[in-house]
Amino acid sequence: MPDGVGSVHPAAVPRLPRNPLRRPDRVAQAIAEASARRQAAVAAHRAAREAIGD
């Protein structure tokens, strides 16, 4: 290994920001976001089918 690359001191590693939401809140938020993405995808699919006359 090159000099000085052997390891990284823990203080040199940036800490990840803490998520202020508790786990159940994060799960509920993820489900809501996935639902919104799915609804948008379904609407786009329907619009595309209507555009081609299917």
Image (cartoon, rainbow, N blue to C red):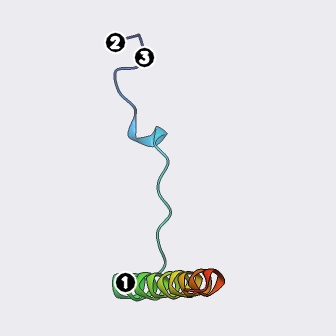
Q: Observer-nearest residue: 20 or 53?
A: 53
Task: Please provide percent x and percent y for residue 14.
Answer: 50, 47
Quadrant of image for the N terminus: top left
Residue carrying label 3? 4
Image location (x, y in percent) of residue 16: 47, 57
For the C terminus, give its image quadrant: bottom right
Q: Is residue 2 above or below residue 10?
A: above
Q: Which residue is mark 1?
A: 27
- Within 10 Å of the Cα at label 3, are there few (<14), some (14-19), or many (20+) other Cα atoms? few
Query: Helix, strand, or loop for circle 3?
Result: loop
Q: Is residue 53 left or right of residue 5?
A: right
Which residue, as the protein is rendered here, is positioned at the far right?
Answer: 51
Q: In the rendering, at what x and y percent does residue 12 appear?
A: 48, 38
SS for callout 2? loop
Residue type at tag 2: Met
**Which numbered tag is attached to residue 1?**
2
Q: Nearer the viewer, residue 49 or 45?
A: 49
Vertical placement of residue 19 versus 27, above or below: above
Amino acid under disc 3: Gly
